Amino acid sequence: MALIAESSRPAQEKRGVLRVFVRRNPMIVLGIAVLIVVALISILAPIIAGDPMVMAPSHRLKGPSAEHWFGTDDLGRDIFARTIYGARVSLVVGFSVAVLAIVFGLAIGLAAGYYRWLDGFIMRIMDGAMAVPSILLALALVSLNKGGVGIVVIAIAIPQVPSVARLVRSVVLSTRSQDFVDAAVVSGSRDLKIIRRHILPSTVAPLIVLGTGAIASAILTEAALSFLGTGVPPEIPTWGNMIASSRLFLARAPWTIFFPGAFLTLVILAVNLLGDGLRDRLDPRLARRM
Protein backbone atom coordinates (compact mmCIF):
# COMPACT_ATOMS: atom_id res chain seq x y z
CA MET A 1 0.00 0.00 0.00
CA ALA A 2 2.89 2.31 0.80
CA LEU A 3 4.36 1.69 -2.63
CA ILE A 4 1.04 2.50 -4.28
CA ALA A 5 0.74 5.72 -2.26
CA GLU A 6 4.28 6.76 -3.16
CA SER A 7 3.71 6.04 -6.86
CA SER A 8 0.55 8.16 -6.87
CA ARG A 9 2.29 11.19 -5.36
CA PRO A 10 4.04 12.34 -8.59
CA ALA A 11 0.74 12.20 -10.50
CA GLN A 12 -1.01 14.19 -7.76
CA GLU A 13 1.82 16.74 -7.73
CA LYS A 14 1.58 17.12 -11.52
CA ARG A 15 -2.18 17.65 -11.33
CA GLY A 16 -1.65 20.21 -8.59
CA VAL A 17 0.94 22.09 -10.62
CA LEU A 18 -1.40 22.01 -13.63
CA ARG A 19 -4.30 23.40 -11.59
CA VAL A 20 -2.11 26.19 -10.22
CA PHE A 21 -0.89 27.05 -13.73
CA VAL A 22 -4.43 27.17 -15.09
CA ARG A 23 -5.62 29.32 -12.18
CA ARG A 24 -2.74 31.77 -12.50
CA ASN A 25 -2.67 31.94 -16.32
CA PRO A 26 -6.27 31.69 -17.56
CA MET A 27 -5.65 33.79 -20.70
CA ILE A 28 -2.67 31.67 -21.76
CA VAL A 29 -4.60 28.43 -21.22
CA LEU A 30 -7.68 29.69 -23.06
CA GLY A 31 -5.67 31.00 -26.01
CA ILE A 32 -3.65 27.79 -26.33
CA ALA A 33 -6.79 25.64 -26.01
CA VAL A 34 -8.61 27.48 -28.79
CA LEU A 35 -5.58 27.35 -31.10
CA ILE A 36 -5.09 23.62 -30.44
CA VAL A 37 -8.74 22.89 -31.20
CA VAL A 38 -8.66 24.90 -34.44
CA ALA A 39 -5.36 23.27 -35.45
CA LEU A 40 -6.73 19.77 -34.77
CA ILE A 41 -9.92 20.25 -36.75
CA SER A 42 -7.93 21.73 -39.65
CA ILE A 43 -5.60 18.71 -39.65
CA LEU A 44 -8.58 16.34 -39.52
CA ALA A 45 -10.45 18.31 -42.20
CA PRO A 46 -10.44 15.47 -44.80
CA ILE A 47 -12.10 13.21 -42.24
CA ILE A 48 -14.64 15.53 -40.63
CA ALA A 49 -15.35 18.04 -43.40
CA GLY A 50 -15.18 16.29 -46.76
CA ASP A 51 -14.27 17.96 -50.05
CA PRO A 52 -14.52 21.79 -50.01
CA MET A 53 -14.41 22.02 -53.82
CA VAL A 54 -17.51 19.95 -54.64
CA MET A 55 -20.21 22.10 -56.28
CA ALA A 56 -23.92 21.40 -56.11
CA PRO A 57 -25.78 24.20 -57.94
CA SER A 58 -29.12 22.73 -56.94
CA HIS A 59 -28.21 23.37 -53.28
CA ARG A 60 -26.84 26.90 -53.67
CA LEU A 61 -27.35 29.37 -50.81
CA LYS A 62 -29.01 26.80 -48.57
CA GLY A 63 -29.14 27.68 -44.88
CA PRO A 64 -27.52 25.65 -42.09
CA SER A 65 -29.00 22.17 -41.80
CA ALA A 66 -28.13 18.64 -40.73
CA GLU A 67 -26.67 17.99 -44.19
CA HIS A 68 -24.71 21.25 -44.38
CA TRP A 69 -23.92 22.48 -40.88
CA PHE A 70 -22.87 25.98 -41.99
CA GLY A 71 -25.04 26.10 -45.12
CA THR A 72 -23.81 26.43 -48.71
CA ASP A 73 -22.47 29.28 -50.81
CA ASP A 74 -23.55 30.63 -54.21
CA LEU A 75 -22.00 27.63 -56.00
CA GLY A 76 -23.47 25.03 -53.67
CA ARG A 77 -20.18 24.35 -51.90
CA ASP A 78 -20.30 23.30 -48.25
CA ILE A 79 -19.31 26.28 -46.08
CA PHE A 80 -18.35 24.07 -43.13
CA ALA A 81 -15.77 22.21 -45.23
CA ARG A 82 -14.41 25.43 -46.72
CA THR A 83 -14.22 27.11 -43.31
CA ILE A 84 -12.30 24.19 -41.81
CA TYR A 85 -9.90 24.04 -44.75
CA GLY A 86 -9.48 27.81 -44.54
CA ALA A 87 -8.10 27.39 -41.03
CA ARG A 88 -5.15 25.52 -42.54
CA VAL A 89 -4.11 28.46 -44.69
CA SER A 90 -4.55 31.01 -41.92
CA LEU A 91 -2.55 29.04 -39.36
CA VAL A 92 0.22 28.20 -41.83
CA VAL A 93 0.50 31.83 -42.94
CA GLY A 94 0.39 33.17 -39.38
CA PHE A 95 3.05 30.90 -37.90
CA SER A 96 5.28 31.00 -41.00
CA VAL A 97 5.28 34.80 -41.04
CA ALA A 98 6.10 34.91 -37.33
CA VAL A 99 9.02 32.50 -37.73
CA LEU A 100 10.48 34.30 -40.76
CA ALA A 101 10.08 37.75 -39.20
CA ILE A 102 11.69 36.64 -35.93
CA VAL A 103 14.62 34.86 -37.60
CA PHE A 104 15.57 37.73 -39.91
CA GLY A 105 14.64 40.47 -37.45
CA LEU A 106 16.68 38.77 -34.73
CA ALA A 107 19.76 38.56 -36.93
CA ILE A 108 19.45 42.20 -38.03
CA GLY A 109 18.75 43.45 -34.51
CA LEU A 110 21.68 41.55 -33.00
CA ALA A 111 24.06 42.94 -35.62
CA ALA A 112 22.79 46.51 -35.25
CA GLY A 113 22.80 46.47 -31.46
CA TYR A 114 26.15 44.77 -30.90
CA TYR A 115 28.23 46.29 -33.70
CA ARG A 116 27.77 50.03 -33.26
CA TRP A 117 29.42 50.82 -36.61
CA LEU A 118 26.59 48.95 -38.33
CA ASP A 119 23.83 50.47 -36.22
CA GLY A 120 23.21 53.69 -38.13
CA PHE A 121 23.26 52.10 -41.57
CA ILE A 122 21.02 49.16 -40.69
CA MET A 123 18.47 51.09 -38.67
CA ARG A 124 18.04 53.76 -41.34
CA ILE A 125 17.08 50.99 -43.75
CA MET A 126 14.65 49.61 -41.16
CA ASP A 127 13.17 53.09 -40.61
CA GLY A 128 12.61 53.44 -44.34
CA ALA A 129 10.91 50.03 -44.49
CA MET A 130 8.64 50.93 -41.56
CA ALA A 131 7.59 54.15 -43.31
CA VAL A 132 5.78 52.10 -45.98
CA PRO A 133 2.38 50.76 -44.84
CA SER A 134 2.63 46.99 -44.51
CA ILE A 135 -0.59 46.31 -46.41
CA LEU A 136 0.60 48.42 -49.38
CA LEU A 137 3.99 46.72 -49.46
CA ALA A 138 2.33 43.31 -49.31
CA LEU A 139 -0.07 44.34 -52.09
CA ALA A 140 2.83 45.45 -54.28
CA LEU A 141 4.85 42.28 -53.72
CA VAL A 142 1.88 40.00 -54.34
CA SER A 143 0.84 41.94 -57.45
CA LEU A 144 4.31 41.57 -58.98
CA ASN A 145 4.27 37.78 -58.56
CA LYS A 146 1.85 34.95 -59.12
CA GLY A 147 -0.49 34.39 -56.23
CA GLY A 148 0.23 31.60 -53.78
CA VAL A 149 0.63 30.84 -50.10
CA GLY A 150 4.44 31.12 -50.29
CA ILE A 151 4.35 34.54 -51.95
CA VAL A 152 1.77 35.75 -49.43
CA VAL A 153 3.94 34.58 -46.52
CA ILE A 154 7.00 36.42 -47.87
CA ALA A 155 4.98 39.54 -48.68
CA ILE A 156 3.55 39.71 -45.16
CA ALA A 157 6.80 38.75 -43.38
CA ILE A 158 8.95 41.51 -44.95
CA PRO A 159 7.02 44.40 -43.32
CA GLN A 160 7.19 42.59 -39.95
CA VAL A 161 11.00 42.37 -39.91
CA PRO A 162 11.76 46.05 -39.01
CA SER A 163 9.63 45.99 -35.86
CA VAL A 164 11.34 42.79 -34.70
CA ALA A 165 14.78 44.24 -35.51
CA ARG A 166 14.09 47.43 -33.53
CA LEU A 167 12.90 45.46 -30.51
CA VAL A 168 15.94 43.17 -30.56
CA ARG A 169 18.28 46.14 -31.02
CA SER A 170 16.86 47.88 -27.95
CA VAL A 171 17.28 44.71 -25.86
CA VAL A 172 20.83 44.22 -27.12
CA LEU A 173 21.79 47.83 -26.34
CA SER A 174 20.54 47.53 -22.76
CA THR A 175 22.22 44.15 -22.25
CA ARG A 176 25.45 45.23 -23.98
CA SER A 177 26.09 47.81 -21.26
CA GLN A 178 25.92 45.30 -18.41
CA ASP A 179 29.05 44.49 -16.39
CA PHE A 180 28.99 40.76 -17.17
CA VAL A 181 29.16 41.50 -20.90
CA ASP A 182 32.09 43.89 -20.36
CA ALA A 183 33.81 41.18 -18.33
CA ALA A 184 33.32 38.68 -21.17
CA VAL A 185 34.78 41.17 -23.66
CA VAL A 186 37.81 41.89 -21.45
CA SER A 187 38.41 38.16 -20.95
CA GLY A 188 38.86 37.79 -24.71
CA SER A 189 35.67 35.87 -25.55
CA ARG A 190 34.68 35.91 -29.20
CA ASP A 191 31.80 38.07 -30.32
CA LEU A 192 29.66 35.12 -31.42
CA LYS A 193 30.15 33.42 -28.06
CA ILE A 194 29.20 36.60 -26.17
CA ILE A 195 26.10 37.06 -28.32
CA ARG A 196 25.05 33.44 -27.98
CA ARG A 197 25.64 33.06 -24.23
CA HIS A 198 25.00 36.49 -22.75
CA ILE A 199 22.86 38.55 -25.14
CA LEU A 200 20.65 36.15 -27.08
CA PRO A 201 18.86 34.70 -23.99
CA SER A 202 17.65 38.18 -23.00
CA THR A 203 15.76 38.51 -26.30
CA VAL A 204 13.70 35.33 -25.90
CA ALA A 205 10.89 36.69 -23.70
CA PRO A 206 10.11 39.84 -25.73
CA LEU A 207 10.34 37.88 -28.98
CA ILE A 208 7.79 35.34 -27.76
CA VAL A 209 5.33 38.14 -26.98
CA LEU A 210 6.05 39.93 -30.25
CA GLY A 211 5.67 36.66 -32.16
CA THR A 212 2.06 36.24 -31.02
CA GLY A 213 1.30 39.73 -32.28
CA ALA A 214 2.95 38.90 -35.59
CA ILE A 215 0.76 35.80 -35.94
CA ALA A 216 -2.45 37.78 -35.42
CA SER A 217 -1.32 40.55 -37.77
CA ALA A 218 -0.33 38.04 -40.46
CA ILE A 219 -3.68 36.22 -40.32
CA LEU A 220 -5.56 39.51 -40.64
CA THR A 221 -3.33 40.71 -43.48
CA GLU A 222 -3.76 37.44 -45.37
CA ALA A 223 -7.53 37.72 -45.04
CA ALA A 224 -7.39 41.33 -46.25
CA LEU A 225 -5.21 40.45 -49.25
CA SER A 226 -7.48 37.54 -50.18
CA PHE A 227 -10.54 39.77 -49.81
CA LEU A 228 -8.94 42.29 -52.19
CA GLY A 229 -8.18 39.51 -54.68
CA THR A 230 -4.37 39.82 -54.48
CA GLY A 231 -3.62 37.09 -51.96
CA VAL A 232 -4.16 33.35 -52.15
CA PRO A 233 -5.80 32.31 -55.45
CA PRO A 234 -9.63 32.38 -55.28
CA GLU A 235 -9.96 28.63 -55.87
CA ILE A 236 -8.15 27.91 -52.58
CA PRO A 237 -10.59 28.05 -49.63
CA THR A 238 -9.49 30.78 -47.21
CA TRP A 239 -11.55 32.91 -44.89
CA GLY A 240 -10.72 36.05 -46.86
CA ASN A 241 -11.68 34.44 -50.17
CA MET A 242 -14.93 33.16 -48.70
CA ILE A 243 -15.91 36.57 -47.38
CA ALA A 244 -14.96 38.25 -50.68
CA SER A 245 -16.91 35.82 -52.86
CA SER A 246 -20.02 35.99 -50.65
CA ARG A 247 -20.21 39.72 -49.95
CA LEU A 248 -22.82 40.19 -52.71
CA PHE A 249 -25.12 37.68 -51.00
CA LEU A 250 -24.88 39.12 -47.48
CA ALA A 251 -28.52 40.22 -47.30
CA ARG A 252 -29.86 36.96 -48.75
CA ALA A 253 -27.45 34.47 -47.14
CA PRO A 254 -25.62 36.03 -44.17
CA TRP A 255 -24.28 32.66 -43.03
CA THR A 256 -21.90 32.63 -46.01
CA ILE A 257 -19.94 35.44 -44.33
CA PHE A 258 -20.82 34.91 -40.67
CA PHE A 259 -19.08 31.55 -40.18
CA PRO A 260 -15.68 32.33 -41.80
CA GLY A 261 -15.78 35.74 -40.09
CA ALA A 262 -16.53 34.11 -36.74
CA PHE A 263 -13.64 31.68 -37.09
CA LEU A 264 -11.32 34.52 -38.10
CA THR A 265 -12.40 36.53 -35.06
CA LEU A 266 -12.05 33.53 -32.76
CA VAL A 267 -8.48 32.76 -33.86
CA ILE A 268 -7.38 36.39 -33.63
CA LEU A 269 -8.92 36.65 -30.16
CA ALA A 270 -7.16 33.45 -29.05
CA VAL A 271 -3.78 34.69 -30.30
CA ASN A 272 -4.27 38.06 -28.58
CA LEU A 273 -5.25 36.38 -25.31
CA LEU A 274 -2.15 34.21 -25.54
CA GLY A 275 0.04 37.23 -26.24
CA ASP A 276 -1.43 39.26 -23.36
CA GLY A 277 -1.04 36.34 -20.97
CA LEU A 278 2.57 35.77 -22.00
CA ARG A 279 3.30 39.48 -21.64
CA ASP A 280 1.91 39.53 -18.10
CA ARG A 281 3.78 36.36 -17.23
CA LEU A 282 7.15 37.21 -18.76
CA ASP A 283 7.21 40.94 -17.97
CA PRO A 284 5.20 41.72 -14.81
CA ARG A 285 6.58 45.28 -14.71
CA LEU A 286 5.07 46.01 -18.13
CA ALA A 287 1.77 44.51 -17.00
CA ARG A 288 1.70 46.86 -13.95
CA ARG A 289 2.41 49.88 -16.17
CA MET A 290 -0.44 48.85 -18.50
Image (tube, rainbow, N blue to C red):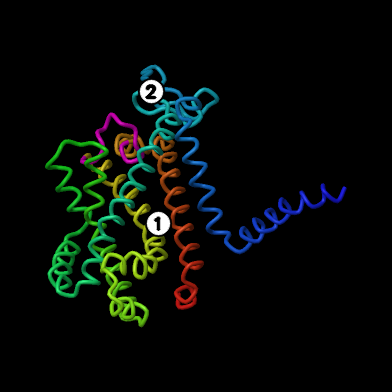
Magenta residues span 230-241
Can you identify the residue that label 1 sits on? 212
Q: Is residue 234 magenta?
A: yes
Q: Nearer the viewer, residue 244 or 248?
A: 244
Element carrying mark 2: loop
Q: Is residue 280 magenta?
A: no
Q: Position of residue 55 (x, y in %)?
A: 36, 20
Identify whether 70 is placed above or below 158: above
Q: Residues within 10 Å of mark 1 (few under 14, many from 20)?
A: many
Q: Position of residue 253 (x, y in %)?
A: 40, 34
Q: Main secondary structure of the magenta part?
A: loop
Tell me the residue at 31%/67% (across/down): 195
Tell me the residue at 71%/53% (across/down): 10
Can you identify the residue that label 2 sits on? 76
How far is the residue under mark 2 from the one under mark 1?
Answer: 36 Å
- Quarter of the image holding residue 254? top left
Tell me the residue at 52%/42% (across/down): 37
